[in-house]
Amino acid sequence: MISSKLIHNGPTTGLIRYWTGRFFLWLFSWDVVGRFPKDKKFIIITAPHTSNWDFPLGILAIYIYRLKCSWIGKDSLFKKPFGVFMRWLGGIAVNRDSQHGVVDQIAKQFRESIKLAIAIAPSGTRKKGNSWKSGFYWMAHKAQVPIVCAYFDYKRRETGIGLSFIPTGNVKMDMDRIREFYKLFQAKHQDMITPIRLKDEDA
C-alpha cells in the first residue's frame, strides 16, 4: 500500500482524502500500487472499464495518490448556479461547437496551467464498444504531455499506475504499447471489454 508521502509533482489534495481512500480500499481488500511520473502535467487513462465499481475504486485510489484530478464536460454544465461547484469538483468546460475543437481547447488549458492532471476513460462506457475514443491521444500529443496508464485488476484486487509516455504521433506504434500493457489485467466483466484500438489506426 502506498504511504502518505507525496509521489508526484501534479496538483495535490490533503491527508483527509488520503486516509479516507486508505480506509475504504482496506475495507474492500484492494491494493494501490505504482507511482505517477514526475511531470507536473499529464493525461490519465483508465482501463479496463466494465463496471460501475470502477469509478469509486478510481476515486479512492486518486485520494491515496493525493492527486487532484480534473475531468472534461460540456460548457452548458458550468452555467450558473452550478458552475462554481462543477469547477470545484475538477471540471473543465469545453465548447463542443467551437471552431477550435476540444483537443485544441484542452491543449490550451495545459499550456496555461502550471499543474494539471486530467482523467479519461477512453472506452467511453462500461458496455462493450467497437473501439476506444481517440480524444485522449490527440490531447496528449497536441499538448506534449504524458499519457499515464491506470488500471483495474479484479483478479488481484489491485488498482494502480504503470506505463507512461508522451505520444509520438505514430498512432499504431503507441497503441501497441498500450495494448501490451493492458493485456496483463482482468476486468470485472471480461466479456464487456472494449477492444483497445483507435479508428485513427486505420488512417
Image (tube, rainbow, N blue to C red):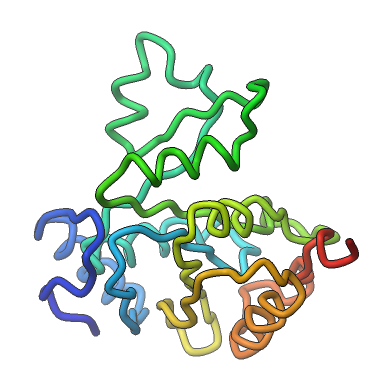
Q: Where's the C terminus, which quadrant? A: bottom right
Q: Is 33 on the left or on the right of 195, as rendered?
A: left
Q: Nearer the viewer, residue 93 or 65?
A: 93
**Residue 120, placed above or below residue 18:** above
Instruction: Please tell me which residue is depicted at 68% across the width and 58% down the height of the picture.
Output: 123
Instruction: Please tell me which residue is depicted at 31% across the width and 67% down the height of the picture.
Output: 39
Q: Nearer the viewer, residue 80 or 18?
A: 80
Instruction: Please tell me which residue is depicted at 43% across the width and 12% down the height of the picture.
Output: 79
**Residue 151, placed above or below residue 14:** below
**Residue 118, placed above or below residue 37:** above
Q: Position of residue 110 (x, y in %)?
A: 40, 46
Q: What number of labels is visible?
A: 0
Q: Position of residue 90 (x, y in %)?
A: 34, 39
Q: Position of residue 29 (x, y in %)?
A: 34, 80
Residue at far top of view: 80
Q: Is 155 on the left or on the right of 126, as rendered?
A: left
Q: Position of residue 48 (x, y in %)?
A: 62, 70
**In which image quadrant can residue 145 be found?**
bottom left
